Amino acid sequence: MSKLIAMKAVYCYFLPEVRPLLKMVESRIPDSMWLVTTPAEEVRQSLESLFTPALEIPATPDGCVNIDEIHVPIIERIQNAYSGIVPGLAGFRHRYPTSGSSEGLFHILARYRSNGLESINLLSGEYEGYSAYASHMGMRTHWVDPEQTNLRKMKPGVWFISNPSARDGNILPDEILHDLCDAGHKVVLDLAYVGATNPHVFDTNHPNIDGVVMSFSKPYGVFRFRIGGFAFTRDETPSLYGNKWFKDTVRMLQALKLAESIGPCAIYPKHQPAQQEIINQLNDEFRLGIRPSDSFLLGHILDEDAQGLPPDKLAMISGYKRGNGYRLCLTPYFEMRER
């Protein structure tokens, strides 16, 4: 390694164990599933070899396959697969299929804006997509450093928070969310990195967690396929209602296969040793003091460690600055190891 090729943006690693599962699902979906006169039972039997127990296939009153409602049993089963690490999802009355988490975030923001919200709060160094969407809707963004601000003393507002955090790939201290919710703030929780870390309980039961979005892009590496996006909201999000028709059913079935065949708790133990090996190699070569993040995709450098680096090393990592630290995406190194 002669040059630092870690990425500044987080591009996922298309996991080798994921690839055959996607092909398997696509190859076993019968053409008849897309015909409105096909009996639902026929489709159930066709998909029986993919899922155990067999997936319930919604039917119209005359017994034909109802693709408009197929997301309902799929989301229910994915919710069950994640119930051990994301308890509370069953308490959200409204559940929508989306293309990744970004679509859900946009529509939730649009609902807030249509209800008169003029600004949102973000932790310093957060995912920039929140502020980009907000600014396009004429909303302001307040960036808040939790190390410098008493969150309980802030005027209650609406927060968009990723956990594990997009700031550095680490799981947020539980007290940050507890303090915000207990102080009357509303939180939209972005769980895009769930599954990419050691199992941790991301409790969504607090009534002030107003919405949750999930994505399979980061943990399973399916960003380019838009697989595994879901939005859970306590109040109806009217602009997402149409997704019952405008959804990719093949991608939803693939998401279910990933959730039940691999699951959110098996990814990190398998790939964390490679993360540690990559970081060890980078530190041996560049002496940057990179630490492994909770997410296997990332490494990070603490601000206090960076302050001890010489000017040439600081220049090398300047583009990786996020909030009070530095974040490096290791995806190119995972791909190099595979090759």
Image: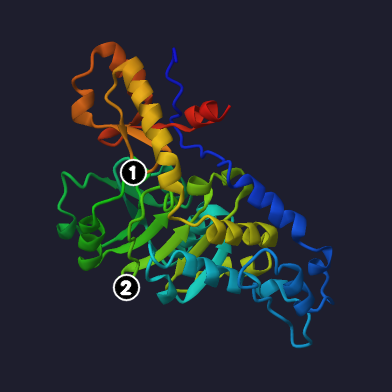
Quadrant where the image shows the N terminus: top left
Residue picked out by circle 2: 207
**Foreground residue, 4 or 113?**
4
Residue 100, percent from left and from top? 55, 53
Dot 1 amino acid type: Asp
Residue picked out by circle 1: 294
Q: Residues within 10 Å of mark 2 (few under 14, many from 20)?
A: some
**Mark toward the start of the polypeptide (1 vs 2):** 2
Give the mark toward the camera: 1 or 2.
1
Q: Would residue 27 be seen by someone viewing this image from the given angle?
A: yes
User: Label 1 to label 2, Cα distance in Å?
Assistant: 27 Å
**Foreground residue, 205 or 155?**
205
Dot 2 amino acid type: Pro
Q: Would residue 162 be seen by someone viewing this image from the given angle?
A: no
Residue 135, percent from left and from top? 44, 47
Residue 311, percent from left and from top? 26, 13
Residue at (53, 72) in percent of width and height? 76
264 relative position to 169: left or right: right
Dividing the picture into quadrants, the one containing residue 302 is: top left
246 relative position to 326: left or right: right
Dividing the picture into quadrants, the one containing residue 44 is: bottom right
Q: Is residue 128 above or below residue 61?
A: above
Quadrant where the image shows the C terminus: top right
* Label 2 element class: loop
